[in-house]
Amino acid sequence: MERPLINLLGMNKQALEAFLLEIGEKPFRAVQLHKWMHQQGVIDFDQMTNISKPLRERLKTLAEIRPPRLRDTYSAQDGCHKWIVEVESGSGVEMVYIPEAGRGTLCISSQAGCSLDCSFCATGKQGFNSDLTAAEIIGQLWLANRELGGFVSHEARPITNVVMMGMGEPLLNFDNVVGAVALMMDDNAYGLSKRRVTISTSGVVPGIRRLRDFTDASLALSLHAPNDALRDQIVPINRKYPIRELLDSVRDYLAALPDSRVATIEYILIAGVNDHRAHARELAELLRTLPCKINLIPFNPFEGSEYARSSNSAIANFRKLLQDAGYTVTIRTTRGDEIGAACGQLVGQVDDRTRRSARHLAERARNEALNEVRVVTLS
Ligand code: SAH
Ligand code: SF4
């Protein structure tokens, strides 16, 4: 039986050198291959002119360079793009490009769906299908770079920042995520600054604790609530890893970094749920000893969700309270609205293996029947 070809696209330096050694080649060829794949966008071995013909022929019998397929492209008036990327499991995941003055941010996915079921998140509502491979994660950057002309012009780089804030929980797909992140920061690949590659997590504490041994990328924490009682409800993984443990792990990660860096605390603002002044005061107190900045994200509605976005005055008050307490606070503006590219609206085309969507619908119908009102108490 013929052996399947090995996909080289997702291999970082270590992995590619190991592969080359295994086939009896010199490991320095990893640099050449990386430059071809990730700087020139070349995926055809025959075009790799500084690699000898016999080696190219040999590589063709053992390996391939296969980015994922682009299924759909949506472009918004404000310059944002959303792409649906097809992954091996058959699902479509989403990535979003957001151009701003002086920088371009690519928001990429780490999983098809998500198992963590945060109450406000469209991705979570559709359940989990599969982890993306390292090739599928870095492949998103490769595809976006190709689409934006980044392999042609090297002067103006279209993508300067990558955030893992698309679909899925990056730290539940740890190995593939840290492998791909290494490639993003490798000077022979994309050469992004470690400050400009951000892993966003909803609070997988063992993953945060392992992270320092593998990367020094920036960290964003999706906190969304200032106390365990409320966070248990809207970010269910909090029941496993409560806030105190979580903040300790983030503090330790920052302390292990060679430079001084702050974590980004993400806090979604949902009307009547977590946007009261008392929540802002409690948050200010909670974060007092953590080096951080706070990013407020007005809730983005999606079909089937029972939440609403906080009013502009509630958002402004929340921000002011935190600023007065000494924090740097930004409010995430909604971009790419008309193409469904905003945070939390990413649904892709995922076939839920957990059948969560069906369960949710049944649950919602039951709750509606009982006319259940969920009351969130302020502590
Ligand atoms: N699983 C990771 C990364 C993906 S979610 C995490 O939770 O951090 C990326 C960001 O989008 C998170 O901060 C998340 O809380 C936010 N988000 C999810 N649903 C949203 C919604 N409906 N409106 C606004 N932001 C949302
Ligand atoms: Fe998963 Fe993040 Fe959405 Fe929560 S917010 S369900 S962790 S993708």
Image (spheres, helix red, strand yellow):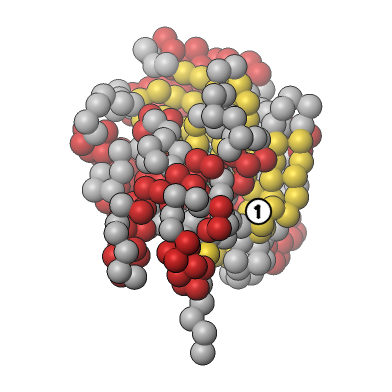
- Give the residue pinned by disc 1: 85
Pick the residue in front: 127 or 160. 160
Q: In the rendered image of this protein, does residue 158 appear above or below residue 56? A: above
Q: Which of 274 and 35 is in front in this view?
A: 35
Pick whichever, 279 or 118, lies toward us.
Answer: 118
When the figure is inspected, residue 357 is found, relative to residue 373, above or below; the finding is below
Task: Give the residue at x 31% y 52%.
Answer: 28
From the top left corner, tell me how far across and down residue 92 is, in percent.
67, 57
Could you tell whether 372 is left or right of 275 in the image?
right
Q: Can residue 333 be seen in this view?
A: yes
- Give percent across and percent down for residue 157: 55, 28
Is 46 positioned to the left or the right of 10 in the image? right
Image: 182 above or below 112: above
Q: Which amino acid type is shown beneath numbered disc 1?
A: Val
User: Is residue 137 something one can see in this rendering?
Assistant: no
- SS at mark 1? strand
Quarter placement of the C terminus: top left
At a point 65% along the width and 53% down the height, the residue shown is 85
Find residue 94 and report its horizontal and vertical position in percent.
64, 48
